[in-house]
Image (cartoon, grey):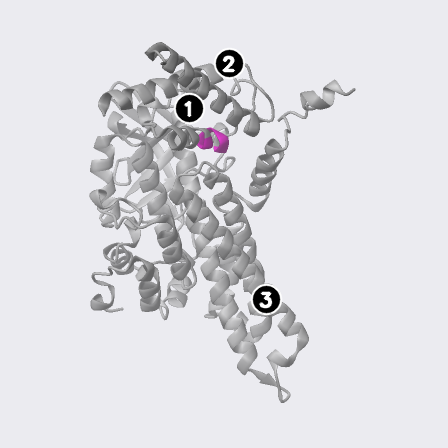
Amino acid sequence: METPNQTDAAAVADVTQELSAYLTRNLGQELGPDEDYFALGLVNSLFAMELVNFVEQRYGIEVGVDDLDLDHFRTLGRLRDFVLAKTANRGAAA
Amino acid sequence: MSDTALAGVADLTDLGARFADSVREDAADWDARGELPADVRLAAARAGLLGADLPVRHGGLGATPAQLGEACARIGGVCSALRGLVTVQSMVAAALLRWGTAEQRERWLPALARGELLAAFAATETEAGSDLAAVTTTVEEQGDTYTVTGEKRWITFGEVADVFLVLGSAGGRPAAVLVEADRPGVLREPVRGQLGMRAAQLAHVRFDGVRVPRENAVAPPGFGLSHVVATALDHGRFTVAWGCVGMAEACLDAAAEHAARRAQGGVVLAEHQLVRSLLGRAAVDSRAARELCLRAARLREAGDPDAIAETVAAKYAAARAATAVAGSAVQILGAAGCAPDSPVGRCYRDAKVMEIIEGSAQVSELHIADHLLRAHGHRPGGRRPEREEGRR
C-alpha cells in the first residue's frame, strides 16, 4: 500500500514528465529543470499563451491575473511547482 | 430595420443572420458616408451582438465560439464595418474577462455587453503594430494614477469609442490601461476614405498626458500584459476570420447568381468554362476557410492550447479566401461589380484590409511555420537539433 509521501512523489514525477514532454514537443529540445526558456529566446507570445492554456486544460486549474508572474512559467521546475501548488489549493478548496 | 425584428433574439445560431438581413440595404450607404450610425450600434448591442460570447452573468448571451463565429460570418457578409464593431468590442471584453480583476469585470463587462460603452483597442502606432516592444506610448506611474502619453493610429471605431484599451510602456515594460475618451487630453482625428471598412470610423488618437486611476491598469506590466494583448488579438483574429468566411460566401453567392442569369451575346455567363473555373476555385476557397474556422471554434470551445495557432491559420486562410473570392466575384460581375454601391466591390476593398489587420498575412505565415517547425524539432536561432549534431 502506498504511503501519502509515495503518492506525492509519484504525482510530482508525473507532472514533471508531462510538462517536460509538452515543452520538448513545442520548443524543439529537451530542457533541464532550471533552464529558462524565456531567457533563451525559445518562447514567443503565442506559445506563452498556449502554455498557460495547456496547464489550465491538463490540470483543471485556473490561471488568474495574479498568477501571471514570469517566475511561475520560466523553467520546467518552476512551472511544475506552480502547477502542484495550484492543484493542491484546488484540492484544499474542494 | 424594425425593433421587433431585433428584439429578443433567442436562437443564437440565428443571431447574426437576422441582424444582417435587417441592415442589408443600408451597408452601402454607411460605406459611402464613412460612418456606422449610432442607432445601428445601439441596435447591435440590443440584439446581443456586442456581448454575444460573454457569460450571461456579465450581461452576455453565453454564445459558444461557433455561434459567435457564425454571427460574425453573417454580419461580415453584409457589412465588414459592423463586424468590426463586434470584433473590437469583443476583443477588449475578452481581455478583461480573462485577465481583468473581479472589480474590472463587474465595472466594464455589462456596460460593454449592453453597448452603453463602446470600446476600442489602441495598439498601433506610426512605427509599431501589435509588437509590444516597439510601442512608444508611455504609461507613467505617479502615486495612485497613471499618466498616458502617446499617439495611436488607425484605431477602429476610435472616432466614437467611449473607452480605449491602450498599450504602452511602463518603465520599459509593456503595460495596458483603460482610458475613458472623455478624460482631458484625449484628442481624436477621424480617418476618412481608407481602402476598406470605411464605415468603421477609424481615428488617430492622441493621449496627451492623460491621467487615469490605478484601477484602470489591466494586468501587471511585463509578462502579464503580454497575455492581455495576446488574448485580445487572438479573439480579434477569430472574429475577423469568421467575418471573412461570410464575405467569401456572400461574394460566391453573388457571383454564381450573376453567372447563372446574366447573358451576353446570347450566352449565359455560366456557359463559359473560364467563368466556371473562377466559381469552382471560389467555392473551394470558401468552404476550406469555413472548415478551418469551424476547427478553430471546436478547439476554442474545448480549451485546447492549439486553438491559438489554429485560429492564426484560420484567419490567414479566411482572409486570403475572402480576397480571392471577392476578386473573382468582381471579375464575373464586371461593371456591375465595380459600381459605387456594389456589395462585391465593397467586399473586395474590405477583404484586402483583412489580410492586414490582427496580424498581416506575412506575420501569420511566420507564426504558422514556427508552430510547424517546432513540432519537427527546430530550434529557434538556427542551431541543429542535438540528434543531428551527434551524427556529425
**SS at circle 2:** loop
Q: Is residue A6 left or right of residue B37?
A: right
Q: Is residue B138 left or right of residue B367?
A: left
Chain of the residue on which disc 1 is drawn = B
Residue at image location 38% in from the left, 12% down from the top:
A6
Chain of the residue on which disc 2 is drawn = A
Extreme-right residue of the structure: B392
Task: Check whether the beta carbons of the residues at disc 3 and disc 1 lie within 8 A of each other.
Answer: no
Q: Which residues are magenta?
A: A46-50
Q: Earlier in the sequence, mark 3 or mark 1?
A: 1
Residue placed under numbered mark 1 in the picture: B223
Q: Quadrant of residue A71?
A: top left
Q: Residue A80: image x %, image y %?
A: 43, 18
How many residues crowd around disc 1 within 10 Å: few (fewer than 14), some, or many (20 or more)?
some
Q: Is residue B202 above or below residue B3?
A: above
Q: Residue B383: image x %, image y %?
A: 68, 23
Indicate yes or no whether the magenta region holds residue B155.
no
